[in-house]
Structures are given as C-alpha cells and as structure tokens.
C-alpha cells in the first residue's frame, strides 16, 4: 500500500512539474517557506513574509520544533481563479471553491494552493485557515479532525496589518451559530466529537465545524485550568506517524482519563453561556446606558468593539459615554468613527454639535448642527435653532 501511495505522489509531482514548465512562476524562499507565484517574485516574497508571520503565531501555541521539518513548506499562488482550477484539475482531477492544502507522504510533494481574491479580508481568512492546516500536518500527518479544524478557525482572523506585522486576532464569527445549535440540542458530545471519522464530519459539517472551534476556544479560555492543561498535554501524545483513528482515540482516551464526560459537557455549556455575541453585548450596553450605568455600558461597548470594530453602534455609544464623562475630544473621535462606518448622519452630526458646543467650539458646533438640521429637518429644526440662538447670543 505504501508503494502505491508513493507512486501516486510521484505521478502528482510529475504533473505539477509539467504545469510549472508551461506556466510562468517565480519563487521566493525563506527559512520555512518556498512560495511560487504567477504574479512575480515580489509578490511571492511578500506572501512568504506573511506566511512566516503566521507560522510564528501558530507556534506561539503549539511549540513544534521547526528544525525537524525536512523541507520548506511549499505554497503556490495563482492570480486567476481559472488558472487555480485548471491546475487542480491536472493534479487531483477536480476543482475547489477555496484554497486547498494538498498533503502527500513527503513534505517535498505537499503544497498549499491559493488564488487571489477581490475581498482582502476573505483572502486573509482563507490563508490563515489553510496555512494552519499545512503547518500542523507538517509535524503531525494525521492530527485529530476537531483539533485541526477547530484551531484553523480559531486562527482565521490572524494576519498582517498595514505595516506587514502578523498577529493573532480573536475570531468569534461562529459564536451566534454555536449558541443556536446548543439551544436546538444538536451538538455532539465532546467524546463523540473527538473521534468522528472524516465521513461523519463531512456529513455533519454544519455542526462539526462550529463546534470544533467552540471546543478549542473552551479548552483555551476556560477559567478551569485543567481544561487548558488538557489541550497542551494532548499535543504531546500525538504521534507524527499514527493514523487519524490512532491519534483521535489516544486523545479521547486521555481526555476521559482525566475528566468526567458528564461534568465536561456541563462546563462546556456553561462556558458557551458565558460568552457574549456582538448583538448581546450591544443590547446589554444600550440597557446599561439607559440605566445611566456608564461604567458598565462602557465595558460592554468596548467588548463589542473588539468583536466587531466595523460596526458604528459601539463607536456611537462610546462617544455618548465619553461626552457624559466630559471627555469631549474622545467623544468627537468616536462620533467621527461612527459617521465613517455608516451611522445616521443627522443624529451623529447633532451629537457632534452638542459635543462641540459643550467644549466652547462654537463655530464647529454651528457647522455640525446645521448639517443635522439639513439631514432631518422635522426632528432637529427646533432643537438646532434653539442652540444656534444661544450661540449667537453668547449664552
């Protein structure tokens, strides 16, 4: 059987070589990666630098010995999705909707295959996900499915900032989904999740995928340090050359040796209940603001901002809270950010006008207030005219 696999790998490698001879690729190499790109060497080098950064992010958690890698990790990047599809059709006889890691018995034959996307955020997410799959399989050929996919989702928000620095960022995209699945009673037991076959995982992907992320998050962030320790201890018992079933069973058995399955389920559910979605944080923040509990409201909206900095609501309310605390400069910064993210212009300009008025910047106050009046005459004409009269009278 091993000979057959080796022959397949050689055939696939030959197909890849034949493709490389007909397509224009340039490469860039770092200590850990070799990147091939049809967009040129500069593009390959930039991608290699990002991948090196992602590797460091992953290894902050896993601490694998990178000196054991037998060859650099290979990544092939296409500018066009059509070329990506054509390449995969030659190599594996089918296409994929997203990036794919092709894993073979030797590191030299394996490669991550990607393509350019119009949406930079989507590209970064797919890259962080599949680069992690490549990373872990370079050290453990068959890691447990829940661990592999759970951490791949866990790292999806990680990537390079404007300066090129790569860092971890929390991913809570699946929190609402996992809470809904919990309320529907459709979650797998933890011990079942740990030993699901590839076919079972594919069949139950709608549950398996978000729950794998949730379980990893639980083990990572549970206030009960025994669960944190289990996660790291389980990595030490993975056998780089074991089968999928072998590694999954070993980790599941290790888990049950130290934890009651029933208690673990209770703790997992309690952990999920303690996690707040963006919508929950906003709802609770609005209530706390209405109750004039500014400290609690501020904490809730700060947490909401971490989960979704592109939504204007936390910015707007943090502006209101800063105004209530007489921090007019901070309030203006939040209001301006809210405007840039799509907040109602009339409402936000009125808030900016009130804020400028309170800080004795009357010319700016008048400009903001006039915009509010123009944006919603019915709501703001009387209020704005009253304030403008006060400004003009110097009172």
Image (cartoon, grey):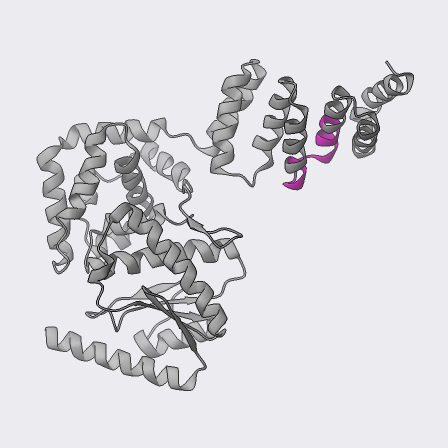
Residue 263, x across and y down, in percent: 18, 27
Report if residue 186 is visible in the image: no
Q: Is residue 318 left or right of residue 7?
A: right
Q: From the viewer's perspective, is residue 305 above or below residue 362?
A: below
Q: Main secondary structure of the magenta part?
A: helix
Quadrant containing the C terminus is: top right
Residue 80 magenta: no
Q: Residue at x 35, y 26 (%)?
A: 274
Q: Is residue 263 left or right of residue 166?
A: left
Q: From the viewer's perspective, is residue 216 above or below residue 296?
A: below
Instruction: Choose between 296 and 30: the one closer to the eye.
Output: 30
Q: From the viewer's perspective, is residue 121 above or below residue 187?
A: below
Task: Specify the quadrant of the image occupied by residue 191.
Answer: top left
Task: Specify the quadrant of the image occupied by residue 84.
Answer: bottom left
Residue 275, x across and y down, in percent: 37, 30
Q: Is residue 316 left or right of residue 177?
A: right
Instruction: Choose between 193 and 373: the one closer to the eye.
Output: 373
Number of marks in the rendered image: 0
Q: From the viewer's perspective, is residue 166 above or below residue 241?
A: above
Residue 57, x across and y down, in percent: 35, 50
Residue 350 magenta: yes
Task: Specify the quadrant of the image occupied by residue 293.
Answer: top right
Bounds of the magenta span? 338-351
Q: Is residue 6 left or right of residue 17?
A: left
Q: Residue at x 50, y 51 (%)?
A: 161
Quadrant containing the N terminus is: bottom left
């Amino acid at each position: 059987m091993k000979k057959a696999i080796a022959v397949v790998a050689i055939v696939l490698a030959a197909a890849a070589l034949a493709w490389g001879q007909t397509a224009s690729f340039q490469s860039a190499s770092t200590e850990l990666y070799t990147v091939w790109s049809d967009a040129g060497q500069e593009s390959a080098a930039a991608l290699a630098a990002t991948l090196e950064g992602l590797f460091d992010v992953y290894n902050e958690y896993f601490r694998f010995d990178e000196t054991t890698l037998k060859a650099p990790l290979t990544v092939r990047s296409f500018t066009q999705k059509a070329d990506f599809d054509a390449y995969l059709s030659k190599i594996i006889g089918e296409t994929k909707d997203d990036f794919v890691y092709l894993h073979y018995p030797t590191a030299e034959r394996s490669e991550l295959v990607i393509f350019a996307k119009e949406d930079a955020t989507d590209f970064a997410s797919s890259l962080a996900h599949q680069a992690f799959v490549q990373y872990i399989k370079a050290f453990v050929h068959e890691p447990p499915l829940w661990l592999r996919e759970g951490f791949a989702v866990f790292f999806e928000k990680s990537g390079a900032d404007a300066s090129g620095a790569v860092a971890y960022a929390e991913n809570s995209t699946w929190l609402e989904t996992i809470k809904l699945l919990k309320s529907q009673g459709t979650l797998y037991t933890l011990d079942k999740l740990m030993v699901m076959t590839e076919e079972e995982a594919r069949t139950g992907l709608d549950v398996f995928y978000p729950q794998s992320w949730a379980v990893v998050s639980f083990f990572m962030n549970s206030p009960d340090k025994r669960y944190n320790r289990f996660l790291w201890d389980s990595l030490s018992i993975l056998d780089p050359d074991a089968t999928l079933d072998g590694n999954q069973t070993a980790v599941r058995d290790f888990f049950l040796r130290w934890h009651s399955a029933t208690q673990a389920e209770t703790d997992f559910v309690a952990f999920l209940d303690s996690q707040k979605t963006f919508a929950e944080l906003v709802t609770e923040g609005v209530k706390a603001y209405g109750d004039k509990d500014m400290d609690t409201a501020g904490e809730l909206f700060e947490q909401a901002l971490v989960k979704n900095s592109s939504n204007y609501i936390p910015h707007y309310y943090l502006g209101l809270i800063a105004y209530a605390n007489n921090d007019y400069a901070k309030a203006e910064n939040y209001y301006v950010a809210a405007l840039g993210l799509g907040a109602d212009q009339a409402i936000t300009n009125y808030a900016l006008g009130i804020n400028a008025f309170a800080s004795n910047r009357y010319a700016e106050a008048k400009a903001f207030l006039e915009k509010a009046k123009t944006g919603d005459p019915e709501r703001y004409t009387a209020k704005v005219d009253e304030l403008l009269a006060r400004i003009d009278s110097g009172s």
